[in-house]
């Protein structure tokens, strides 16, 4: 094994171990938490090393980069996740490639996905991105709009709304992150009973390299980890 592959395998093992421990601490099993490996910083060699280390859920934040990687790994059993902002003019090219869109951040986008998804055999799974920290620079629905958003989703029969996604605020440290994650969970629990039938909201996508254990303790079912997987590479 090359140094690069070896190092990445070690990092994956470390992250998986910490995920399992955080899950155990919150009375859940490691199998309840999906690790999405974020490949946006790296090229094909590192991505291949992740595959060799047994990972198959990969995330990209830019559609253009997701298209390129999905093409490069077309013969591999990769499940691609789009985790960043999706422009409506990229919806058509994105839908056939992804297993989950984490970043549905406006009703106009959801409408565009729904229209395109009408041609697919199954509804397209999406998560609603929520701007719980209120950072002006972040995408996502504002928490106080979620009731109205959820109520209007029944009109979109070609999307399957599986849950919520958020990023913790940048400036408030790990305690701020814990608050943001708890808030997303609270919001999910509050809006879930009002959802139409195409909405399940079982998934909470939250937690990155610096805070994924806190996210799991707050109920994350999906964590999106990038830089921690590539530590120590020259
Ligand atoms: C880059 C990115 C991540 C991963 O960030 P790391 O801190 O490198 O783990 C997770 N989620 C989103 C939306 C991202 O853009």
Image (cartoon, rainbow, N blue to C red):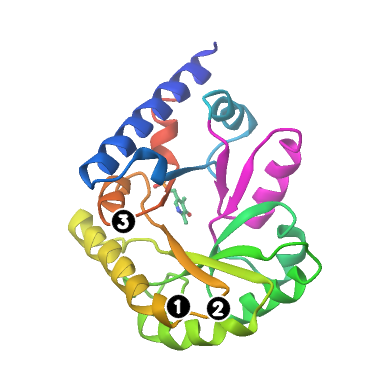
Q: Residues within 10 Å of mark 2 (few under 14, many from 20)?
A: some
Mark 1 C-beta closer than 8 Å to ligand 1: no
Q: Residue at x 29, y 71 (%)?
A: 186
Tag 2 near tag 1, CB within 8 Å: yes
Identify the mark at residue 219; answer none if there is no mark: 3
Q: Is residue 31 magenta?
A: no
Taking the view exactly as shown, the residue that stands out farthest to the right is: 119
Is label 1 or label 3 in front? Answer: 3
- Name the disc covering residue 89, or none: none
| Residue appearing at x 23%, y 59% in the figure | 178
Q: Is residue 3 left or right of residue 211?
A: right
Instruction: State left or right for residue 72 relative to residue 194.
Output: right
User: Which residue is under mark 2?
Assistant: 106
Q: Residue at x 18, y 58 (%)?
A: 175
Closest to the observer, 23 or 215: 23
Above or below residue 136? Residue 121 is above
Q: Which residues are magenta?
A: 55-84
| Label 3 crowd bin: few (<14), some (14–19), many (20+), radius 10 Å | many
**Position in image of residue 188 (x %, y %):** 37, 71
Q: Considering depth in this image, is 233 or 36 the residue closer to the camera? A: 36
Q: Which is nearer the N-term, disc 2 or disc 1? A: 2
Q: Which quarter of the picture shows residue 28?
A: top left
Q: Secondary structure at mark 3?
A: loop
Residue 61 percent location from the top left of the image: 56, 54
Is residue 234 something one can see in this rendering? no
According to the image, label 1 marks what residue? Answer: 141
Along the viewing direction, whichever of 197 and 105 lies nearer the viewer: 197
Mark 2 or 3, closer to the camera: 3
C-alpha gap between disc 2 and disc 1? 7 Å
């Amino acid at each position: 094994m090359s140094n690069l592959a070896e190092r990445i395998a070690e990092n994956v093992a470390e992250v998986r171990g910490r995920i399992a421990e955080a899950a155990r601490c919150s009375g859940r099993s490691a199998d309840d938490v999906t690790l999405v490996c974020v490949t946006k910083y790296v090229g094909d060699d590192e991505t291949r090393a992740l595959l060799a280390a047994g990972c198959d859920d990969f995330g990209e934040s830019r559609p253009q980069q997701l298209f390129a990687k999905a093409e490069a790994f077309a013969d591999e059993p990769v499940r691609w996740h789009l985790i960043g902002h999706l422009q409506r003019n990229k919806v058509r090219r994105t839908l056939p490639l992804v297993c989950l869109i984490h970043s549905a951040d406006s009703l106009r986008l959801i409408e565009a996905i729904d229209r395109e998804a009408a041609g697919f055999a199954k509804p397209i799974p999406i998560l609603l991105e929520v701007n719980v920290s209120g950072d002006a620079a972040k995408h996502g629905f504002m928490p106080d709009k979620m009731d109205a958003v959820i109520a209007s989703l029944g009109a979109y029969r070609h999307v399957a709304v599986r849950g919520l996604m958020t990023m913790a605020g940048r400036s408030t440290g790990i305690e701020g992150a814990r608050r943001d994650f708890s808030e997303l969970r609270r919001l999910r629990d509050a809006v879930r009973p009002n959802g139409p039938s195409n909405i399940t909201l079982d998934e909470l996508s939250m937690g990155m390299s610096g805070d994924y254990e806190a996210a799991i303790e707050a109920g994350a079912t999906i964590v999106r980890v990038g830089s921690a997987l590539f530590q120590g590479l020259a």
